[in-house]
Every structure is written in C-alpha cells, then in structure tokens.
C-alpha cells in the first residue's frame, strides 16, 4: 500500500501549521519545494471573505494553493481532509480540438475555485467558504492519445502496468482518457469543484468512474502527525522528502528532453500518477492480535517506530536479529519489502485518501485506501516495488486491488496557459 509520511518543513505562512494538523503524509512535506505556493486570504492571497464578504475566514478556509507554477498543485501540496478522484472518457466524435477546449475550461474553473472565487455558472454550494486548500490536478490516460490523434507523442511511461497476483481489477473503474484529482479541507468546497468540472465537461467528456476519499481533518491532533490508515497503522513514514537531494529527479519529469521525459518536452515538470483502489479486508485484519499485526507491517502500531527500536523516523535495522535467531523485522514484513534500499532505491511520493463506501450484503465494510503515488517514471518507481510486494508481502492476504489507473500529469500551467496546452497545441 505504501501510504505517506510527515516532514516538519518550516512553513512561514501564518497559521498554516495549525491548519494542516494531522494531514500527515505529504502534510508538511512541501510548499515551495514542489513549486506550489500557499497564501492566506487574510494576507491578501484569497477571496478573504466570509458570509457576505465582510468577515475574515478561519485559517482552514483561508489557505490557498496556487494554480500556476512549475508543477501542478495536488502533488506536493499538504494532504487535504477530503478528496475526489474522477476519470472521464471523451465522447464519441470528440478529438484534439474538443479536448483542448475542455482543458481550457477546466483550467479557468480550477484557477477561480482554488482562489476561492466563483466559477462560471456557479451553483453557490461553497458560497460561504474560502479556498480551503483546494487543489485540482489534471492527467491524461493512455487512450487519450489515440482519441486525439496524438499517439506519436504518448510517452512510453504510459505503457500498461503489468498484472499482479493481488489484482481483482474492475475495468469499469479503471483507467480513462482524462483523470482529475480534487482535494480540499472542506467537503463542500471539494464537492463544489467536482460538480463544476463535471458541468464543464458536458458535450466533450463523460464520467467513467468516480471515487471519494478522506483523511484526518486539520487540527484533529495536538500536533502535526503522520496519518493512520483504516487498519490503524501509522502510514507513510518512509515517503521521499523534498529536502532529499534526489527528490525532484525521482518525482518530476526533467526538461530538455533528458531522462524520464524521453523527449516528451510537454511533460517537463510533470509526473506520473498510479492510482489504485485498494480494499482492506478489515474483518480478517482485526482478528489478528497486536503483535501479529506489528510483525506483518514491521513497525509498532502505537507510534510507527520500527520493531528494531527508536522512534517513527528511526531507520529500519534490517540486519538486527532477535534471541530466536530470526530477523526482528520479519523477512516478509511490509516495511522491509517496500523499503527503497530493498528495491534498488526505487521511490515514489505516496499521497492517498482513505475510503468507506458502505457495508456489503455480507456485513463486511467496503473500505480501504485510494492509493495515489507520484514518480518521474512508474517503470522505476511503482512497478518494481509492487512486483516485489506481490511476491511475498505479509500484508497481501489482507488487501485486494480492485481498480487501477496510470496517468501522465503534465507540468503546471504558466500565466496565460491552460494545463496540457504544450501537448495539445504543439
């Protein structure tokens, strides 16, 4: 599953530390390091209005992510408490011209809503709220390039992912021509963006699938902490950090036709998103005693520290043996198998949402992780790690991969541009 970690990057914006609260994961990872800025409406960065435009917003509502930048927002942006993932297919007859017009509309809508301003034909759902850390991120699936006559410009990084033994994929909830990730710290703000983008797509694209997720709300814990997943585990401690010297190289596509871009200059500053709906078999998991759960993961449940000791951020001691002559962190523990040092340095930035879509007829919860990971090349990030997990991860019997998608997410739009313009108008 490989979810996300917390990094105590100093963020200078007033009250932002309090607003991210327990966002965990990329919660305090980022800010300027990812090319995504933040502003408080109280500092002139957002709409700055409460009801009727006369009252200052609370810090959660006032936080604004910038639409324009080197990278799209929503990759290294602090993880929000609400999220929607949605894929669209172009309607029959729609091609490159219609796709360009749609991305132009979507970009204008995203820019307005991320600034806490109304969109064209606004429904008023989020009328009283500020930006609330809203981010909207756009990506292209493999089939998009065929349907727009751009197959020659499709990156090899969009080649289909291999099949894995834990896959039980529903094709109706997988892939898609276009992908949109929405995140916000207010549920109405997130829904408002989803509805606005769906309306913008009318006549050009239709929804293929849509998924809803959540994380801890800002301020829910006494201090910023790495989030827990629905298994109760501290989840994502080993995420790459923007302070790492090789962070950009691992996560973002370089420019100048170098490296992972494979000559696809339109992807410079972009990233590749692997999206997986991972169902957690919670009834089975919760039957395990605590010590067994900890051995499956390789970390203490109480604080996320390695079984070899220390605190959450203490490196794993993969060579430490116990009195029984066995490694303290079992050979098939999830933390051991997914560790970068066990995978030739392969790394990805994991930025998930939890989900709960009700109780099945058999009484089991339809719940788990909307896994989203970012990397400059999925063939060097997600694929080798997942292959190794697939061969012997102790966690595998307790999860099931039910949907999958791979999307090319171009770099951020410059002032006056829309997302994807360098591909669609080249």
Image: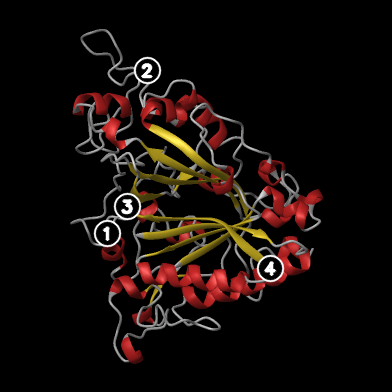
| Image location of residue 238, percent across then percent down | 38, 38
- Give SS at disc 4: loop
Q: Pick whichever of labels 2 and 3 is earlier in the sequence.
A: 3
Residue 273 seen by the camera: no
Other residues around mark 2 within 10 Å, as few (<14) / some (14–19) / many (≥20) = some
Point out residue 39 in the picture as x, y percentages from the top left corner. 41, 73
Q: Is residue 333 left or right of residue 98?
A: left
Residue underneath mark 4: 204
Front in this rendered view, residue 292 or 165: 165
Label 3, label 1: how many angstroms apart (C-alpha)? 12 Å
Q: Earlier in the sequence, mark 1 or mark 4?
A: 1
Q: Which numbered disc covers residue 331?
A: 2
Dot 3 lies on which element? loop
Is residue 203 depicted above or below 318 in this figure? below
Q: Are marks 1 and 4 in contact (CB under 8 Å)?
A: no
The residue pinned by badge 3 equals: 8
């Amino acid at each position: 599953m490989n979810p996300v970690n917390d990094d105590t990057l100093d963020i200078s914006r007033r009250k932002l530390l309090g607003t991210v609260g327990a966002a965990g994961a990329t919660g305090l990872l980022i800010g300027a390091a990812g090319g995504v800025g933040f502003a408080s409406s109280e500092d002139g960065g957002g709409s700055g209005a409460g009801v009727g435009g006369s009252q200052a917003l609370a810090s959660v509502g006032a936080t604004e992510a910038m639409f324009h930048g080197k990278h799209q927002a929503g990759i290294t942006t602090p993880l929000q408490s609400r999220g929607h993932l949605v894929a669209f297919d172009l309607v029959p007859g729609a091609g490159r011209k219609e796709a360009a017009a749609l991305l132009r509309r979507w970009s204008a809508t995203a820019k307005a809503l991320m600034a806490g301003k109304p969109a064209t034909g606004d429904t008023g759902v989020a009328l009283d709220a500020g930006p609330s850390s809203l981010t909207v991120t756009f990506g292209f699936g493999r089939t998009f390039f065929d349907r727009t006559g751009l197959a020659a410009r499709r990156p090899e990084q969009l080649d289909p992912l291999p099949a894995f033994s834990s896959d039980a994929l529903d094709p109706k909830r997988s892939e898609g021509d276009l992908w949109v990730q929405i995140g916000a710290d207010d549920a109405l703000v997130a829904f408002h963006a989803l509805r606005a983008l769906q309306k913008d797509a009318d006549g050009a694209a239709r929804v293929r699938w849509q998924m809803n997720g959540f994380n801890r709300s800002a301020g829910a814990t006494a201090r910023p902490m790495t989030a827990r997943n629905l298994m109760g585990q501290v989840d994502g401690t080993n995420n790459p950090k923007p302070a790492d010297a090789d962070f950009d190289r691992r996560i973002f596509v370089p420019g100048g036709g170098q490296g992972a871009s494979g000559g696809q200059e339109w992807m410079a500053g972009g990233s590749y998103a692997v999206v997986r709906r991972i169902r957690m078999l919670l009834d089975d998991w919760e039957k395990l005693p605590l010590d067994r759960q900890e051995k499956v993961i390789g970390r203490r449940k109480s604080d996320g520290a390695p079984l070899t000791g220390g605190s959450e951020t203490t490196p794993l001691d993969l060579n430490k043996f116990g009195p029984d002559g066995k490694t303290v962190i079992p050979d098939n523990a999830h933390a051991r198998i997914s560790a970068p040092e066990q995978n030739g340095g392969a790394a990805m930035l994991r930025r998930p949402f939890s989900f709960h879509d009700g109780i099945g007829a058999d009484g089991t919860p339809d719940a788990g992780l909307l896994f989203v990971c970012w990397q400059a090349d999925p063939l060097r990030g997600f694929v080798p790690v997942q292959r190794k997990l697939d061969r012997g991860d102790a966690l595998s019997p307790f999860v099931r991969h039910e949907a999958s998608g791979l999307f090319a997410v171009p770099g951020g739009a410059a002032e006056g541009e829309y997302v994807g313009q360098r591909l669609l108008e080249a």
